[in-house]
Image (spheres, helix red, strand yellow):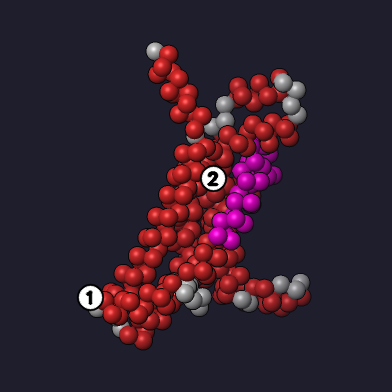
Amino acid sequence: MDLAFIAEIVPRLLAGLPLTLQLAGMSILLGTGIALPLALAQQLNKPLLGWPIRSYVAVFRGTPLLVQIFLIYYGLGQFRPFLQQIGLWGLFREPYWCAILALTLNTTAYGSEIMRGALQTVPRGQIEAAKALGMNRLQVLRLVVLPLALRQALPGYSNEIILMIKGSSLASIVTLMEVTGIAQGIISQTYRAIEVFVCAGAIYLALNFTVSRALAALEHRLSRHLRLAVDRAEINK
């Protein structure tokens, strides 16, 4: 293992970290914003809403993210006249926005299922109690259902965030120079794949470790009331 070579390439790989964070962060934010309404729509038990959402989720959960990126990046080019007509070609001809779209659609599908499961865990008794206090449906949703559901969804969504950070590496196949893209460029110049990919993997590992610890701390803070209830129960025994 050539330490001098590693010391040379690590700064070059780190130069792609901001783009990696942009891809993962923007797709997660957009995906979460779309996933929650989709999950809520499925709770209405209306077939006209439920079937299209379930079909979308099945497609994007059942196909590889790599295929989705290829279809969006290369496939949208076949609709260039239509996209030009509606003024979107300038957006979708850019690899960055194609990658964002693919990552967002993918994480939305997984996120909506996480949210749907979390919404179903909200105790019916708490909803009925909120209604008995005179809350309307919007207040019940905002003050009771969503806080409880989001807390329940956090562990599953933490895994999805980590998967998106790793999934952002696939953006390198559409010429985006994030960490993996830069790593491939260095390998094509030096033919030293082991050192380069070990360093790139270490960067992803450190990033995901930091994110997982931050999310674990958030989960610990949000569940403080549960620990207090357990402590009180132990004291009262």
| Figure quadrant of residue 2 | bottom left
Q: Position of residue 189 (x, y in %)?
A: 36, 86
Give the vertical position of 16 relative to 186 (above or below).
Answer: above
Q: Residues within 10 Å of mark 2 (few under 14, many from 20)?
A: many
Q: Residue at x 72, y 21 (%)?
A: 133
| Figure quadrant of residue 43 | top right
Q: Is residue 126 left or right of residue 201?
A: right
The secondary structure making up most of the magenta span is helix
Disc on the earlier residue, 2 or 1: 1
Q: Quadrant of the C terminus?
A: top left
Q: Residue at x 42, y 49 (%)?
A: 213
Task: Assign a secondary structure to mark 2.
Answer: helix
Residue 14 falls inside the magenta stretch: no
Q: Position of residue 100 (x, y in %)?
A: 58, 65
Residue 30 visible in image: yes
| Amino acid under disc 1 | Met
Q: Mark 1 — residue?
A: 1
Residue closer to the observer: 67 or 19? 19
Q: Position of residue 104 (x, y in %)?
A: 58, 59
Q: Are marks 2 and 1 in contact (CB under 8 Å)?
A: no
Q: Which mark is residue 113?
A: 2
Q: Residues within 10 Å of mark 1 (few under 14, many from 20)?
A: few
Residue positioned most to the bottom = 189
Q: Which residues are magenta?
A: 25-51
Residue closer to the observer: 127 or 217? 217
Q: Quadrant of the N terminus?
A: bottom left
